[in-house]
Image (cartoon, rainbow, N blue to C red):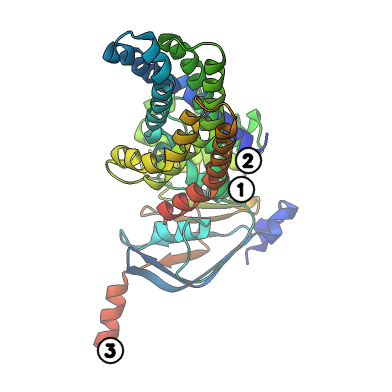
Amino acid sequence: MSALSNMIWRDVRQSYASGGTWLPVIFYLSAATLFPFAVGPDRELLLETGGGILWIAALLATLLPLDRLVQPDLDNGLHDQLIVRGITDELIAFGRLISHWLAFGPPLLFAAFLASGLMGLEGPPLVTLLVSLAIATPALAGLAVMIAALTSGLKGAGALGGLLLVPLAIPLLIFGAGSLSDQSGSALLFLGAVSLLLVAVTPFAAGAALKAARE
Amino acid sequence: MNSGASTEIGKGSNITLSATGLSCVRGGNLLFRNLDLELRSGQAGMLTGPNGVGKSSLLRLIAGLLPAFAGEIQVTGSVALCDNKLALDEHLPLEAALQFWARMDGRNTEDVGQAMTAAGLAHLAEVPVRYFSTGQRQRARLARTFLGGADIWLLDEPVNGLDRDSVDQLGDVLQAHLQRGGIILAASHIPLPIPADLAIDLQPLEQELEQLDACL
């Protein structure tokens, strides 16, 4: 088994075994459940705003696992041991991106599917919502890994993580939530472009942060 | 050169570890400067000196975890670092936690068993690592190091928390590693049960500077 797949397999197994991967799902469903109580059971209103709310909930769910992504492995000495074996910080970050996406993306999509029922979403709008979230989950996973690496070793990293996520996630939110009312499909293409960019940047940005944290 | 001990395995003969003019700066302080060391196949080096003098930093420099402020390090052979970090998944049983590193280092299940036996942990294979005592954690760190099969072992306080029998057992494993042609560089306050071919006593630089002042 190659080093990368070994690292990814360990992370994914740990995420699912610890139950931490279901936390965003529960959070997501809670947010979706609370929303109709807050705005009232007006079907028209829910249909119109539900998609956007589910998108915001997805962004907030991204914040939940931040403290488990990098810090425990740094404290534990796992990263040190990987570096001694000649594995670069960038590869560690890349592995973390993939493993986090595997533990975060599918459960989130599942939760979005369940929650859309509460908003009365069905048919093409539901498909668009799930497609846009599916395109965005790699980018959300990448943002989480980058922010976790940047804030590793800092006190109050959680609050800082929230502040860092907001500006970085705005393009995703604009094109992602925008795709729900966009008939031409170009919002989805823009969303894909932003997602690709964030995924491509993640290994290098997070890798540089890990390197800086070690020295 | 200790040529007698290096004839066990072919690859053993070209394992070397050397540093020239090495200086280390941590947190704006110069820890040591102009340090030279050379170890060849089958040799062991001992690092001593007071706390905070840079023993662990020297090991991390050699392991490639820190950049050198000045000087060069040349390493031929694979390196394993055994420092105060466990790097094992706490919730997993010891054997399963070691399996991760076995896959990483291209070792098999049999090697995991041997490493646990060498560290005196075979009876704890099924116990989750989080229940380990201080001494057992130390032995788990050593087991991870033995398992990797690296040529050069960098050991930071390897006998911390070990009982007397465990220290003797560690001595046997270290001796066997040297016999195979490996290199050991250890930082320890307690003398290790192996002969040292090289002894480096790091001293705080302030003292050195004061002595210089006194001379002037």
Which amino acid is tagged 3? Cys
Q: Earlier in the sequence, mark 2 or mark 3?
A: 2
Q: Residue at x 51, y 22 (%)?
A: A129
Q: Is residue B183 visible?
A: yes
According to the picture, the residue beneath numbered tag 3 turns out to be B215
**Secondary-structure class at tag 2:** loop
Q: Are marks 2 and 1 in contact (CB under 8 Å)?
A: yes
Q: Nearer the viewer, mark 2 or mark 3?
A: 2
Residue at disc 3, secondary structure: helix
| Pair 2/1: label in front | 2
| Residue indicated by mark 1 | B150
Sequence order check, earlier mark of 1 and 3: 1
Nearest the camera: B146 or B57?
Answer: B57
Q: Which residue is mark 2?
A: B105
Residue B9 percent coordinates (x, y):
72, 51
Q: Are marks 1 and 3 in contact (CB under 8 Å)?
A: no
Q: Which chain letter matches label 2? A: B
Asked which quadrant contains residue B149, the reply is top right
At horizontal 53% and vertical 63% (from top left) the residue drawn is: B197
Identify which amino acid the numbered label 2 is placed on.
Answer: Asp
Cα separation, mark 1 vs mark 3, equals 45 Å
| In the foreground, B182 or B35 | B35
Q: Alpha-carbon neighbours of circle 2 within 10 Å: few (<14), some, or many (≥20)? A: some
